Amino acid sequence: MASHEFGAAVRQLREAAAPGAVGLPVGGRRVRGLRREELSELAGMSADYVRRLEQGRSHPSAGVVNAIARALRVGRADYERLCALAGYAAAEGQVPIDLGPGATRLLERFSDTPMVVSDAAMNLVAVNSAFMALEHWNLTGDRWEWNLAWRTFCDPLDAFKQSAADATEHEAILVARLKSSLLRYPADTSLAALVDDIRSRSRLFDTIWRAPRPVEAYESSATITQSDGDSVTLVGNLIAIPGDDLAAVMLTAAPGSDDAARLAEVVSAADGPAVIKVGQPGPG
């Protein structure tokens, strides 16, 4: 199964590659992306071997994975994914922290929806003005205080409250994401230190880490209290941005509800840019 998944990923990246971006002529093409023969020449292997890889009939060495990644000039997240599918730790294995174009467009196009973007280690990478208008999280502090999981388990925000059921779902999501990230980035010492720190500080986190809860839905609701004492209940939905290995959390209210009216009032007073990059001092 892993070989087939690796092969499918290589074919997808090959067909999505822009010939000009890898130094090939762009005119007179009848197929999308690169031909197998072109990839084989760029990567220094036979076209038949590329075909076997894509069909899941050969398992690549770490050198082959690196050669294909270099030939296709893939980004960090896609390189990490190829390594993981082939069963290898990436050469560098560090959590990517760049705010890519996909996440930037998401923040810009939903400027009236409170949103945060985090990296695979769950550090904040960027937020928008609508999120800042909720007033429940000042983007200050040291080390792990910028991290969504550390905040939840070690230093919960006073203005952020959840029911027992929603808290259970939220905790399961956080642990599942960190477990997955630690497997994908085994060489990231800061990520490992983050997990160790949360496990040492939070018995609850350590318990869930040892016996993970199933994640039924990547969403949960919470009530956020503003400085004027009014509150609004919002649902947070997790949206993966796989190309950059980032994730966005969008906070919305039920259409036509009092919370939707309150959210609209709060967001209308938001003042600032659509994209606020966060200078995170945490892992990654």
Image (cartoon, helix red, strand yellow):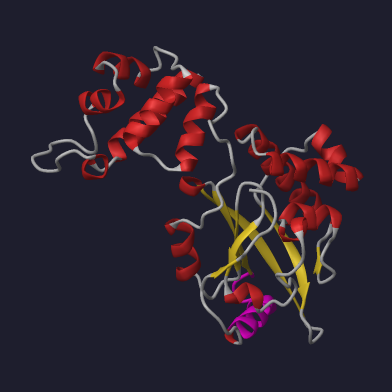
Residue at position x 65%, y 37% in the image: 180
For residue 12, say whether it is visible. no
Percent coordinates x, y for residue 215 in the rendering: 70, 42
Residue at position x 43%, y 17% in the image: 60
Q: Which residue is nearer to you in this view: 128 or 220? A: 128
Tell me which segment is drawn in magenta: 253-267
Q: Which residue is nearer to you in this view: 118 or 95? A: 95
For residue 139, say whether it is visible. yes
- Looking at this view, name the residue that lies furthest to the left: 28
The quarter of the displayed image where residue 151 is located: bottom right
Percent coordinates x, y for residue 177 in the rendering: 67, 43
Q: Main secondary structure of the magenta part?
A: helix
- The answer to whether residue 198 is left or right of residue 180 is right
Question: How many numbered callouts?
Answer: 0
The quarter of the displayed image where residue 253 is located: bottom right
- The answer to whether residue 62 is left or right of residue 228 is left
Height in image: 235 above or below 198? below
Residue 257 located within the stretch drawn in magenta:
yes
Percent coordinates x, y for residue 245 in the rendering: 53, 46
Height in image: 161 above or below 85? below
Percent coordinates x, y for residue 82 in the rendering: 47, 30
Height in image: 232 above or below 177? below
Residue 259 located within the stretch drawn in magenta:
yes
Residue at position x 23%, y 34% in the image: 34
Height in image: 100 above or below 86? below
